[in-house]
Amino acid sequence: MINAVSFLGNITYNINRQTSFGNKTKPMENDCFIRTTGAQNSSQNDFIQWAEATNFFPQKLSEVMKNEDNILGKGFSNTVYKIPGNEEYVLRVSNSSDLNFDDLSDYSLEDTEDKNLDGNYGQCVAKIKSSDYRKPEIFVLKKQKGITNGNPPSSVIFFENGTLKPGELPYEARERKEHYAKCLQILADMPQESYDELVHNLSYLGEAGYRFDYYNPNNFLLDEEGGKINIIDLEKTQKGSKNDLGNALWALSNISYLPTFMSKHDNSPMPEEESNKAFENTMTVIDKYTKAMKNNGEKYSPDGYEFFQLMNSLPMSFYLRSMNIEEKRQKMVDMGVMD
């Protein structure tokens, strides 16, 4: 059994908040997508059968894409649309594309579902593509449940010159801090079984040939009602691969946002009680995830860059009762979750 550090009293700390545009971001809307999958030949595809039976394609697709009320979320790279009358799938199109939704006459529906992949991870099951390779593709994805976890990286809301994109909130905005704290509380309240399932799924996806994009904390969706930590944003890779489970914990905990949340030197400082609660919840997330690693017989890799940042964080230092990185690693070894 892995025991988390007891949280007693107030935590005192002195975090120097860096004033750079890298410390700003805004939670994305539900971005349920996977970058790409290989085409599969099959006579069975639930979405294609539904689309043909309801005349969704090609008759109704254009109307759906032209109606902004159908937009579920718009992230850095893609926009996701709901499909009226179908709660099982969503549509995704690249933000960089110039798609004429009025004329989809040269588009066809192609089955891309990986029939060997068991479960829902927001994966692509079909794509709608033009005979003209220069025109953008529309991807059909399995719909996931939950709110976006934490805050995305700065590249989502900033231009390359460091200026904030129109309509985006500053990184230290109260709304972002409240969303971050809410996500940590949901995660802390999740049962151990939710973490066990998450680690299992990440391992399974690697073996099945899918790499999870851990660079964005938003790529986890938190289904509080269902008690699920859902995964989105995969890319196809070689079967038998391994997802870096330590880097995934870095994303799940959204540890890079903690210094901003706890800072007392911006325009929206959080009360001491809420700062301490976020710190405590972060340790709970680390503990439950680490227990899930042990329950699944998995090991943290010491080579993950993001995991190294997490290992050097204050919550991890409190959890492992050490500020020394080598002592922390040895304690992980003693727990049976690192070689």
Image: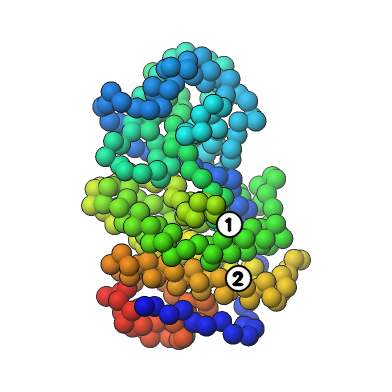
Mark 1 lies on residue:
151
Estimate the x, y position of residue 303 in percent, counting from the top left: 33, 69
Answer yes or no: is residue 12 visible: no
Q: Nearer the viewer, residue 227 or 166?
A: 227
Q: Which mark is residue 123?
A: none
Residue 249 picture quarter? bottom left
Q: Which amino acid type is shown beneath numbered disc 1?
A: Asn
> For the N terminus, which image quadrant?
bottom left
Q: Is residue 189 left or right of residue 171?
A: left
Judge whether 168 appears above or below 295 on screen: above
Estimate the x, y position of residue 10 in percent, counting from the top left: 64, 83
Q: Residue at x 44, y 31 (%)?
A: 140
Estimate the x, y position of residue 318 in percent, counting from the top left: 50, 82
> For the C terminus, which image quadrant?
bottom left
Mark 2 lies on residue:
278
Q: Which amino acid type is shown beneath numbered disc 2?
A: Ala
Q: Is residue 266 left or right of residue 57?
A: right
**Callout 1: SS:** loop
Q: Is residue 271 left or right of residue 180?
A: right
Judge whether 339 appears above or below 89 on screen: below
